[in-house]
Every structure is written in structure tokens, then in C-alpha cells.
Image (spheres, coloured by chain):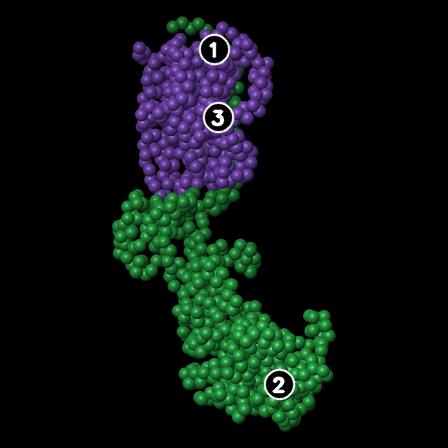
Chain colours: A green, B purple
Amino acid sequence: MTVSNRFSHKAYKKRFVVFATAMIFFFAILTVRLWYMQVVRADYYKNQSENNRIRLRTIKASRGTIFDRNGEILIDNHPYFNLAVVPENVSDLAKLLDTLATVINIDKEKIMTSLEKRRTPDFVPHTIIENLSREEVAKIEAHRLNLPGIEISVESIRYYPYQTLASHIIGYLSEINELKLKMDKYKGYNSGDLLGTFGIEKTYEKFLKGKDGLKQVEVNAVGRELNTLNMKKAEPGNTLFLTLDAKLQEFVERSFKGKAGAVVVMDVKNGDILAQLSKPNFNPALFVKGISSKNWRALADNPLNPLQNKVIRGQYSPGSVFKMVVAAAALEEGVIAKNSIFKCSGTYRLGDMRYKCWKRWGHGKVNLTEAIAQSCDVYFYNLGSILGVDKIAEYAHKFGLGEATGIDLEYEKIGIIPTKKWKRKVKNEKWYDGETVSVSIGQSYVLVTPLQAAVFTATIANGEYVPVPRLLKRIVKADGTTVEGLQPKKGKKLDISKATLAIIKEGMFNVVNKAKGTALASKPTVVTAAGKTGTVQVIANKLRAKLENGQTRYEFEDHAWYVSYAPAEKPQIAIAVIVEHGGHGGSAAAPIAKKIIDYYFKEIAGDDDHV
Amino acid sequence: MFDRRLILNFDWVYFFLIVILASIGLTNLYSASFTIESASKAIYIKQMQWLSLGAFLMTIIFMVDYRKFEQYAYFLYAFGILLLILVLIFGKSAGGSQRWLAFGSIRVQPSEPMKLAIILALAKYFHNDSVVDSYGLRDLIVPILMVGLPVLLILKEPDLGSALLLVIIAASIMLFVKISLKSFLAIVISGLITTPFAWMALHSYQRQRILTLFSPGSDPSGAGYHINQSKIAVGSGAFFGKGFMQGTQSQLRFLPEHHTDFIFSVLAEEWGFFGCFIILLLFLSLLLWGIKISSHSKEKFGAIVAVGITAMLFWQIVINIGMVIGVMPVVGITLPLFSYGGSSLLITFLAFGFMLSISMRKFLF
């Protein structure tokens, strides 16, 4: 081999130097860049690397349970078992499902398609069956070795041992929505969390929720958990004790079966709600895993409105129950004395108008206590006309009517206690004297909720203040201590003289105990009681006759009211009953109250210290 | 055939630099092939097999007088072109491009041997050429066509990184054999003019990768993910590193392609600036020693081959590390002796064989 082109070193020497220098230069750039990243900015990148590998996982806190006043559990948590497949641990899916089919009933095809459609990585468990029974769980556990890749996961759901009992108080939970998640109030909630949205679950959400725990885990790039680095345990929610008495509540619900309306039983002194019913009701269990649209429609479309808590949201004319307000006003204002007499001929005239007493031939000459006991309308037409609507309203407010009772449930309605000003504002019309006549027997614009009626009755019974009704007895933390600062609120003082109250109470006593009393037939056998019936027209007589045309229609029947307290001498409980379209207060509502009073004083009072 | 002087003149410095770098590379790959969940030995054992084969081929190459290859340079070049055509017809695709030829269980990437073939072919061309002073544009038509053909074939695969590498290796050689300033500028300008057309010819993922270089934060889960995770790995290594097998970025698999293109970030994460600096020093020593080998060669063919190989190594190192630390686009160029991969490793060792061969034969003339 000949060297045809001898290599001239001289010509190339410079190029070697240039090449070497260029290489050193490039390497210097790399070194400077590395220095910048690994020394100057090292902390920043270290931080990024930690963020990469460390993830926070929440540990769900178990929600607080709810008991009645005696420790009967009303809302419990139950495990809810799901069956999942971890695809990466399954070598032969068809074989696995065949084996599983010999253990429990499954729909193989459906499971196959759901597994094929999944979009999660293979190490993430994919739920194939929800809500396994305990027997199924036991069977699967027994065959565990033959079922590789199968996992049973547990979540906690609400369980209602009494089913529909007190459903409007119990309430329900629903998944938190996107809108709320963004609100400051719901800080600490995550997507998918449940939130109390109705009843006591809503009112005491912040106590029931508990605090979710946190787990710091090391994950790899696809999010698989490798190690737990740190853990903060979840704090369970607090336990609630309600003022309700489950036994009494059950009895109340039994007594009210087949009717629509509401019942309230409360302690006249401290405002404890012992029982409270709104009918028709619903089954809170329907809401547990999210209510189906079919079930929801059925509830929402029902004309009797099962989702409404009529105790606080139902507004009814109080009818004759309102007469005690007019009586108190007349006595306090000096319009009448105890024995003042009006003659009832069955009709009251005002100008050209005639107002009828419910008793067509009239009550004859009656005094106030007789007028209350026999519910003489004309007597109160007279009182009302003299007092005027604004005075009546003033006294109604003294008893807490037209105002929120302050019960620990949300969305309470306050009813209507009309005044001249009110009518001008709302209807933009002047007040007519004839309307005052109707107001004096609790008709016309007057509206109260069953709870207001109960509080009103309790106020007369205790004679000193307007009790604030409440459902919460106490809240107990996980460590057994009671949450402070939740003592019952003392209601506002009742600005009515003892003498006036004594007269009204005598009238109410006579309703149940004296001849001609409208609720004489519903006199309790165990203790004495006082009360007042009410019968509320829902449609004008003439119009009703025309529309019914001989056939009675449910929606045109009168509402039946009855309020009562017992024992008459030393009152402990107050009751309000309204039976929608039930007819006469004395015959439709009073007997229910009688049963409840008898049951309460026979079965419950005495073995409990809530007097 | 065996001259005693050959053994006396064996280039131990270059050889030891190779041995040290290869050992560190293998150790680093050992760490990279482990994750917390799975310990797969397959990768580094395979790499060890390739290393042994490479060392064997290297030995054969340096025992043969490299000038023998000058005779076959065009033949080798033609063979390389044939492989590139075959890959377009029968190639196995991976990630949207056809880069592999399968021979049984062995897969070969023909763009790798082409690098060496083009160096030998250009060396032969410039060696035989009688131009002494500097090359004008007209003198360069043939070599430009020689480079252009394989570049187009590789772009067709498409493999932007390898095509680019071929171009800059050839450009380095042309600069070395002295191209006139006028022609150099002409090439650069025509390059600039064709850039927009080249841009349009690029696949969208390739464009994205170049764009991502300029704003890596813009798409942290998509195209920017590689760069971001790599930078986190490198930066979090800090001065002394997280320690051998302690790199969370690679062990937890945040780092993609961490045993191939991004192998350097594993080293940077586990050994820190300190380790990187030493590796850079070793690589630089290898390259400068390569320049020395070229400059000591008594004839032009050997000198051009040595410079070409050194340029090949240099650009691969700079581009690979540059992309790992976010100053170069992610173009898929491996780091010699560190990245996992048979084709690249074998070609690197063949190149070393030529270097040693040239070095030990400098006294023969």
C-alpha cells in the first residue's frame, strides 16, 4: 500500500487546536448548566422530586351516629361490601369468573363488558358487584384461595333500623356537588363526599362529619402506592342524642296511620321535641346510595308532598285554636272581664254582612270560658271587632306566632299574622273590618305551622315564656365528653298576666272536661288534660256544595286541628295535631291526642326524667 | 502480520478510558434497570453480552490494519445504504417509525452502522482527492450527495436524531479537511433556506419536541413530560447525588426511557454534580485523546477517520447530555457506553477498534 497523499501536519495543526478548543468549550457549557441545575437550583428540583413521589390520600372519617333521648339508635352506619377485581393479578379472567359463579350468583357477561370498558390501570381494583350480602362475603372469603385477583372492599353507609320512623327529622345525605365544593364553607370536603342535605343530618353536619385523616404515601409514576410514609388518623364524627323518644314516636306514627298531616309532642318547659310526625313520610334508605330518578319522581310528584316536613313547612289556618290569642288580647286590653257575656244567636252582623257561628241555632248567652269550651264563634267575632286586627296580631306575636320558633331544622316557615300594614304591603289593599271578623276565629289570612301551634300551646301551659323547640339533646365526642355550648335556649318571656292565663286555661280545661266541651269525648283516662279543637274550612261552603254536587271530595274536607297540654294542673307536654282534610277537630284530631297523652303518661313519663 | 511494535505501541490510555467509562456505564445501567417493584436483571445482563461482543469485535478491528478498510469503504457504504432501504421495506416499527431490522431475535438499527460507513467513505473520498488547499462548493458535490442519500433514507423512517447526527458528523469532517469559508457560508445559507421546508416535512411529534425545548413547562404531561422529569432528576441530584440505586425519579419510574436516551439523568440523580463532572472529564479526555490520535497519524485516511469518529462521539455526548439537561431538543440520540442498546454499543466499540488501530499504527510509516 502506498501513501499517495502524504499527510502534511503543518496545515492541519491549527485545525486540531480549533477542534479541541471547541470540544472543551461545549463541555464547559454542559458543566456550567449542570452546576446551575444541581447546585444553584438544587433545592427547587429536590422539592419537585418530593412532590412527584409523595401523594396524600384521605382516610374517610366515619360519620357520627344518632340516638334518641334514651340511647335507642336511630341512624347507624353499616358496612357496604363491594366485590372488585384487580386485573393485573388475574391470569385467566374467564376461569376466575367461572369459579366465582360457583360461589355466588353473577352475571358473567355484564362483568366481562364492564371490565373491558374500564379505563383505569391494571393495578386499580375494578368494582364488579356492589352491595354483597354478609353470606356472600362469607362464601367468597371461604373460597379466597381459588379466587386470585378478587378483592372485597368495604365502605360505610347510613342504616336506619326504624326504617321510615321520624324520616323528616332523620333526613338524608347526598353527594356534595361541584358548586358547594368551591365554597369556603365546605373546605375540607372532597369530590364524592356525602353531605347532610335534609333534616338533622343537615343541621348538625359539622358535628357528624368528623375529620378525614391523611396518609402520606410514596407512589410511582403510575400512582401505585408503595409505602406509607406518614399517617394522620381520621377522627370519627360526634354522636348525637336527640330529644325524640323512639317509643313515643313509634306510637304517634301508629296512631296517625293512614292520615295526612302532622303531629308534634313537646316538653312545655325546655322545648324538647318528644315526637314529631309529618305524613306522608318517606324512607330515608332510598337516599343511601343516591336516590334513583324513578324513586325521586315518585316522591316529588306525590300531591301529598311526602318530602315536605309539614311540621315546620306546612302552613294552615289555625281556626278556633287561634281563639286563645283573641281571648288573651281582650282580657289584657280590658275589653271584657272573665264573666262578660255575649249572646250568640248563630249569626253575627256587621253592616250588610252576616257571619255564622258553627252552631246554626247559636249558643245563647255564653261567658268567655264557655265560649272557649264550646268554641262559640260569635263570641269571638264580637271580641275581634272591638280589638281590631292589629291588636290581635300584637298578642299573637307575644305567643310566638308569626315568628320562627327557632327549632334546629332548616327552612322553617313562619306563617302569617296579618295586620293592616301587612295587607297594604303584600296585597296593596286596605283592610276590611269583615276580615277582622274572620281573623278572630283564625281564618282569613292567618296561617300557622303545626310546630308554632305546639309552641303556642306549650307557652299557655308553662305560662312564663315561649319555649324554643329543639331536637338535639346533646352531642358526645368520640372520647366520651359532651360538646359544650349547646344548652337549650330560653325563649322570650310571655308578657301576659297570670290572671288572664288562668281564665284561658280554665276554658281549655273545660273543652275536655266540662259538658258541651268540644273534645269531651277525647278526655284522657290516665291524666287530666286541657285543649282546644279547630276545624278549618278549605273552601267556601257554597262553592264546595256546587263543586261536590252530592259527592264528597277529599280535598274539600275541612282540616282538623287539636292542641292540648297535660296534665292540666301541672303541664308537662304539649301536643298539636292536624289532620289534613280530616273533618272536625273534635272528632278527627282530638282522639289521636288523647291516645298519645294516655300512652305517654302510662308508658313513658316516670321512667325518664325529662319533666 | 504481527509486528512486535504493534503491541509496544498499543494505546493503553485510550483503552483504559474506554474500560473505565464502560464499567461506569454498566454499573449505572444496573441501577437504572431496577425499580422498587421489580428487579429485572435482563437489561444489564444483555448489555454485558453486547459489551463482550463489542470488545471482541474491537479486538479484531484493531488487529487488522485499518487501511484495509479503505479498500472496502465504498462497499461498506453501499451495504449500509442497502440496509437502510431494507429497513424501509421490512422494518419493524416502534413508536410510529420504522427503525429496526429483525434477524431472528436480534434487532439491528441500520442507521447506526451508517454512521461508521459514512466516516470511512468520506475519509476515502477526501484521502483520494488531490485538492490540497481548500475545498470549494463544486468539490463538495459528491460528498454532499454521499451524505444526502442516507440522510434522506433515515428521515423517511423517520428518525430525525440519527439523520441530524449523520449531517453534523459529515459537516465536521468537511470542516476538518478544510472547506473554504465561501462554500461553508453557502451551505449554511442554503441550509437556512431549506429549514422551513424541513420543518414542514417533520412529523408533528418531532415539531412538538423542538417546540417543547423552548418552553418545557407548556405541556408537563405531554411532550414536556420527558424533559421536565429528566430535569427534576438531574437537579434533585444536587452536589453529591442521592446515592447508588437511590434515585427516586428512576426507581419510581417517573423518568421515561431511563435506561436508553435518558440514562444520564439516572447518573446525575444518583451521583450529583460531582459524578457528572467526573464523567464529563473522562469523556473529554477520551475525545481529546482521539484528536491526539488523529494528529499523530502519519497519513490522511487515518487522520480523517479518527477525527470523524471523535466527532461522532462528541456530538452524541453533547446532544444526549444536552437534551437530558434541557438545552437540546429530545431527538433520541444515545449516550455512548451508557445507554442500553446493542446496535449503538457495537458501533461504538467498532469505532474504538479503529481508533486503537490508527493509534498503534502511527509509527509504521
Q: Secondary structure at mark 3?
A: helix
- Amino acid on which disc 3 is placed: Leu
Label 2, label 3: how many angstroms apart (C-alpha)?
A: 102 Å
The amino acid type, in three-letter code, at marker 1 is: Phe
Q: Which residue position holds label 1?
A: B126
Q: Quadrant of residue B55?
A: top left
CA gap between label 1 and label 3 equals 27 Å
Asked if residue B191 lies left or right of residue A172, the reply is right
Quarter of the picture holding the C terminus of chain B: top left
> Do dots 2 and 1 share one subunit?
no
Q: Secondary structure at mark 2?
A: loop
Q: Are the residues under marks 2 and 3 on the same chain? A: no
The vertical placement of A168 against A96, above or below, is below
Q: Residue at x 53, y 34 (%)?
A: B212
The quarter of the image holding the N terminus of chain B is top left
Badge 3 local density, few (<14 within 10 Å), some, or many (20+)? some
Q: Which mark is residue B160?
A: 3
Q: Is residue A447 above or below residue A14?
A: below
Distance (Cα) linking label 2 and label 1: 129 Å
Quickly name the residue at label 2.
A357
